[in-house]
Image (cartoon, grey):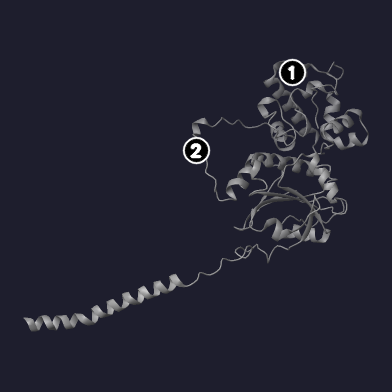
Amino acid sequence: MSGQRSAMALDRAPGGLLGLTLVLLLMLCLLSSAQRPSAAAPPVGSATPWGRDYFPNTLLTDQDGQTLRFFDDLIAGKVVVINFIFTGCGDSCPLETARLRQVQKLLGERVGQDIFFYSISIDPLSDTPAVLKQYAERFKVGPGWRFLTGDVEQITELRHKLGLFIEGVDNGRNKDHNLSLIIGNQASGRWMKASPFENPWILADQLANTLHNWKEPSTEQSYADAPQIRPPSTGEELFRTRCASCHSLGPQDGQGLGLRDIGPDLLGVTGQRDPDWLRRWIKEPDRLLKEQDPLAVELFARYNRVPMPNLRLDDTSVTAILDFLQAESQRQQPSVGAMATGAGGGGTRPDPGGPGAAGVQ
């Protein structure tokens, strides 16, 4: 028996030694890898396809005269929103700036800390830093939002790189340009186009949560508490997408919250203005200002010289907006709505320049 046990032990020895050897080798490998210095993290801009090798380091100057490099100083490792404007624009640019101002107010102190706004001029010959500063002040923008100018050819290159240049439109002589803006997180390589007519709460949520990979904790709420949403009329949809960047419509529409204080509140406006004048003011405000219409000039001066944009609305759209303004005024203040319903071309109305008078601006 003892001889058999010795033979069995000898038979098992090679396998046992082999296993022990493998364990020792594995431990040595682990110790070696633990002591080896880790590889350096990739530099900012090299971890995504859209880094320093893709974006040019264009030199731009902001409204305060500070010179900045587009990639290194403005977007590297940041969550940003970028649009292209020119201060002489009489239609889409004021609307886009007003909408982004709402987004900035919703984001609060995060703008300038972990979210950054950049509006770049496509007319740098006219839009000097001083002109851009006046433009920013007229719209009462807060910190963390830079208005930038630079070399026109280099800015055009930026527009191409960001996908915001349309051949046949942007290279025309009338300064028509792509109205889209772009939001993105350079570090993650995630970029999205957005419309200037987008709901400001949606844009704010994309910038604060989606592009930050939901790093901030969210508050759980019950679906039972969600409000009932009714389908909007054509007039309401036009008002929400075209007018609500600058105007509130009564206290139920956020009046006094500061999101829509570029122009006056419009509750009851259909009963306070001559219908023919109001229709024309909504359709072609730039022409009324050019003609030096007294009321148009007074409203322009009263509301910080921010021009009412020409939204290129047809007669049907203007009628839809007026119908919505009247119906909503009637819903919120029946007496005001009744006055609007009975108002004709020659009725008695409040002094257009008097305290509290509403106007479309």
Relative vertical location of residue 94 with respect to residue 124 in this rendering, above or below = above
Residue 60: x percent and y percent?
Answer: 78, 57
207 relative position to 98: left or right: left
Asked where in the image residue 9 lies, by quadrant, the reply is bottom left
**Position of residue 181 measured from the top left corner of the image (x, y, whole percent):** 71, 49
Q: Are marks 1 and 2 in contact (CB under 8 Å)?
A: no
How packed mark 2 is, by other alpha carbons closer than 10 Å (few <14, some 14-19, many 20 or more), is few
Residue plotted at (92% across, 37% down): 290
Residue 183 percent across, percent down from the top left: 66, 51
Q: Quadrant of residue 8?
A: bottom left
Direction from residue 291 to residue 142 in the image, left or right: left
Under mark 2, the amino acid is Glu
Residue 270 can be seen in this image? yes
Find the residue positioned furthest to the left: 1
Q: Quadrant of residue 142?
A: top right
**Neighbours of disc 1 within 10 Å: few (<14), some (14-19), many (20+):** some
Measured in 3D between alpha carbons, the distance from the residue under mark 1 to the one under mark 2, in whole angstroms, is 40 Å
Q: In this figure, which residue is indicated by the disc labeled 1?
A: 336
Q: Which mark is residue 220?
A: 2
Q: Which mark is residue 267?
A: none
The residue at 72%/31% (across/down) is: 235
Give the quadrant of the C terminus. top right
Residue 91 falls left or right of residue 213:
right
Could you say whether the residue bearing mark 1 is in a helix, strand or loop? helix
Query: Which residue type carries mark 1?
Result: Val
Residue 164 percent coordinates (x, y): 73, 55
The secondary structure type at the circle numbered 2 is: loop
In this view, the residue in front, 155 or 18, is 18
Mark 1 vs 2, N-terminal side: 2
